[in-house]
Image (tube, grey):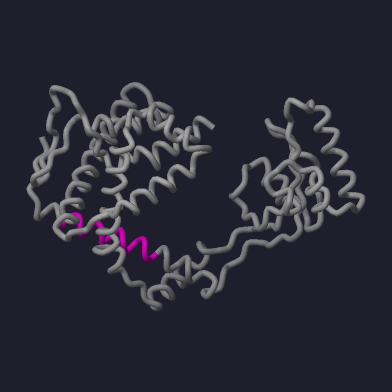
Amino acid sequence: MKAKLSILLLVFVLALQSLALCQTTGAVNKILAVVNDDVVTEADLDEALLSSIDDLKKEYSGDELKAKTEEVRKDLLNQMIENKLILQEAKKDNITAADAEVEQRLKEVKSRFPSEEVFYGELEKSGVSTEILKKRYRENIIMTKLVDSQVRGKVVVTPTEIENYYKIHAEELKAPESVHLRGIILRIDQDSTEDAVKQKADDMVKLAKEGRDFGELAKAYSTGAKAKEGGDFGTVERGQMREDFEKVIFALKPGEVSEPVKTDTGYYIFKVDEKKDSYVRPLPEARSDIENIIFREKAQKRYQDWIAKLKRDAFIQVK
């Protein structure tokens, strides 16, 4: 849970890589870049870099870590310069974010934590005040509005582009193998030993194979979140579940029930109701995905061109 909270804090609370607008109080705060009337300081960049250091240390060490850190540092500095330019442009266009929008963003982030107490506890550990957090969200909302207006809102994907893309990439757009899956989850906890849970799992498999309704067994005995729905996981595509589960699931034929699959927390029993092989999707089925792919590509190109123009028209000095 703590690791998950750290990730949420990084992505939804600190947002350092994309915003990096922390307040600092050091007596000496070296200016790294001048962006028109704004500056990016060394303290700003160091604060932003903290969010990446731990991840880098997990993959690299020694000289390689040093080189990767410097690479990330340069990328962050460039991103911070671009953020300054976007905010300056938004100010020219009188783009603002209402208090209600900021509060809604804060509410969305809080909802990703078990409770408000946990959220504010993690926020306090990070050393970021609620006011600074709201300032970051306000600026993020403002930047998003401007990018929507100047980039995304001006991208058009035509039917001809979609059709041409499909002709070239139809094989890449194949629907993956999938199953309609049900599951029974039996967890090991302080009230039940592993042997007892294993015996119960074996009993469930035996009953299901003798003809008992799998959904009713799930409702009665499963401790999973889908128990009330008869253990119905819905359609699951290959690649969506952990490897040891998929090895069992996709070996089953429609109507078959698996033997218990042991995990660190208990036992899983699976049943495949339906099974579909991978197939080349017809254009009408793939159209929405193709449109999204082309839109992202064109929006990225337009964003790069737009940012390049902002940089050409600005006074930028990197020290």
Q: Is residue 252 magenta?
A: no
Number of numbered discs present?
0
The location of residue 160, given as percent across then percent down, is 39, 78
Describe residue 41's horizontal placement relative to residue 278 as left or right.
Answer: left
Looking at the rendering, which quadrant does residue 80 occupy? top left
- Residue projecting furthest to the front: 100
The location of residue 172, given as percent across then percent down, is 50, 62
Q: Quadrant of the N terminus?
A: top right
The residue nearer to you, when weighing 174 against 301, is: 301
Is 68 above or below relative to 110? above
> Which residues, given as a range, are shown in magenta?
294-309
Q: Residue at x 45, y 42 (%)?
A: 110
- Assign the magenta stretch its main secondary structure: helix
Q: Residue at x 41, y 74 (%)?
A: 164
Is 93 above or below relative to 220? below
Q: Is residue 296 magenta?
A: yes
The residue nearer to you, when weighing 228 against 52, is: 228
Is 280 above or below relative to 217? below
Describe residue 271's horizontal placement relative to residue 36 as left or right.
Answer: right
The residue nearer to you, when weighing 230 against 42, is: 230
Q: Residue at x 13, y 28 (%)?
A: 30
The location of residue 290, given as percent across then percent down, is 45, 67
Is 309 above or below relative to 270? below
Q: Quadrant of the C terminus?
A: top left
Q: Residue at x 42, y 31 (%)?
A: 122
- Residue projecting furthest to the bottom: 160
Describe residue 214's horizontal placement relative to residue 242 as left or right.
Answer: right
Looking at the rendering, which quadrant does residue 199 occupy? top right
The residue nearer to you, when weighing 259 against 19, is: 19
